Amino acid sequence: MTELEKENPVDPKVAAYRQRRRFVFEQLFMCQFYPPEEVDGQLENLVCNEDLMEELEENDLPAEDVAALKEKAARIMACREELDARIDEVATGWKTSRMGRTELSLLRQALYEMLYESDTVPYRVAINEAVEMAKIYGEKDAPGFVNGVLGRLVRSMGLAEDEP
């Protein structure tokens, strides 16, 4: 559990959901340290940090759930060219090749959820969770940057048309 989460306790279901998100985020983050041709093989071998693994075990996360989370990370990485192209289209003055690994991992995860998991993850939730994680893992300006890019993606995808 992060210091921010300790200071602001949340519903246990939300906490468990965030742990799962963190697991996927860490997998995506670590993959960026390998050449693209090695990512698929490396995903099978990656583990997340000990603290997160302990939290997952304390919450009785079954091994098949861990496998499903790794599979989600693999699906996101398999789509990275498509995701990065969409991000590049809206990230004014930035290209994914110049973005920090933290921000890029969060953007890929949120965009993937907006494109492929919108039936279970509303876009507002994907954005909010990415911004919250940017506050924890990113630099000072990361939350605003992530929010801005995801907001432009939402508008470019026509998702915000139903809003007042």
Image (tube, rainbow, N blue to C red):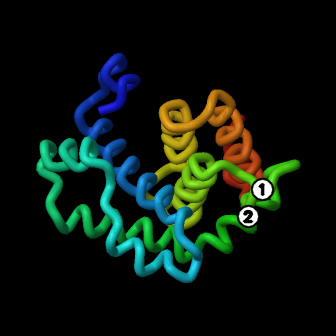
Query: Along the line of sight, which residue is nearer the eye, 76 or 123?
Result: 76
Mark 1, secondary structure of its residue: helix
Residue at (35, 30) in percent of width and height: 2
Q: Where is residue 18 drawn, in percent x and y?
A: 36, 42
Query: Along the line of sight, which residue is nearer the eye, 126 or 137?
Result: 137
Q: Quadrant of the N terminus?
A: top left
Q: Indicate the quadrant where residue 141 lies.
A: top right
Residue at (18, 45) in percent of width and height: 54
Q: Is residue 8 left or right of residue 36?
A: left
Instruction: Identify the residue position indicated by label 2 in the image.
Output: 86
Q: Quadrant of the C terminus?
A: top right
Mark 2, secondary structure of its residue: helix
Query: Along the line of sight, which residue is nearer the eye, 142 or 9?
Result: 142
Q: Amino acid at mark 2?
A: Arg
Instruction: Identify the residue position indicated by label 1 in the image.
Output: 156
Question: Reading the chain from its start, which is encountered first: label 2 or label 1?
Answer: 2
